[in-house]
Amino acid sequence: MVEYKLVISEREKSVARTVGDPQAAGFLGKRIGEAVGGELIGAMGYTFRITGGTDKSGFPLRPDLPGGRQTRLYVGDGFGFHAPRAGMRRRRTFRGNTISEDTVQINLIVEQKGPKPLAELFAAA
């Protein structure tokens, strides 16, 4: 059974929601940067864009790493590592950009708003 924690961000605030099967099955195979219809999670009229996430070990999904595999990359200052000194680099573990069964959290932003606010839609859920 697949279960994801969705963190949906609007300009003003963020809303968190946990989804399980069959809603979670609609996210399998999606990649960072793809658009997802709000009907998938019960938010009619909304469109969301996947911006990132984390896997079961807490490693971030990296947009430029294809697939759902876990790998160690040698990175400098930027995504996943902020160097305390100029020129410093480290090896860090990342997960690919595809959502799989190992993904725990998915970060979404609102691309198109629906008729009701998100806080109203997810307050009763």
Image: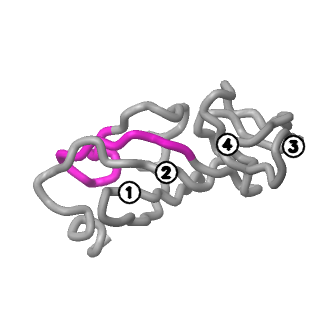
Q: Amino acid at mark 2?
A: Asn
Is tag 4's residue or tag 3's residue first in the polypeptide sequence? 4
Q: Which residue is mark 4?
A: 79
Amino acid type shown at disc 3: Met
Helix, strand or loop at label 1? It is strand
Q: Looking at the picture, how far across and down is residue 47, in whole percent?
A: 28, 41
CA gap between label 2 and label 3 equals 29 Å
Query: Of the residues under marks 1 and 4, which one precedes in the sequence?
Result: 1
Query: Which-is-in-front pick, marks 2 and 4?
Result: 4
Q: Position of residue 28 (x, y in %)?
A: 53, 37
Q: Nearer the viewer, mark 2 or mark 3?
A: 3
Q: Residues within 10 Å of mark 3 (few under 14, many from 20)?
A: few
- Please report contact status of discs 1 and 3: CB closer than 8 Å, yes or no: no
In the displayed structure image, the side of residue 72 where residue 55 appears, left or right: left
Pair 1/3: label in front: 3
- Within 10 Å of the Cα at label 4, are there few (<14), some (14-19), or many (20+) other Cα atoms? few
**Which mark, residue 88?**
3
Residue drawn at x 31%, y 57% as measured from the top left: 11
Q: CA distance from mark 2 to mark 4?
A: 15 Å
Q: Is residue 52 left or right of residue 7?
A: right
For numbered disc 3, what is the local secondary structure? Answer: loop
**Residue at 72% in and 40% down:** 95
Q: Secondary structure at mark 2?
A: strand
Which tag, 2 or 1, sits closer to the chain's start? 1
Measured in 3D between alpha carbons, the distance from the residue under mark 1 to the one under mark 4, in whole angstroms, is 19 Å
Q: CA distance from mark 4 to mark 3?
A: 14 Å
The residue to which callout 1 is attached is: 9
Mark 2 crowd level (few <14, some 14–19, many ≥20, 10 Å Cα): some
The residue sitting at 87% across, 43% down in the picture is 88
Q: Earlier in the sequence, mark 2 or mark 3?
A: 3
Write down the region rendered in magenta.
37-52
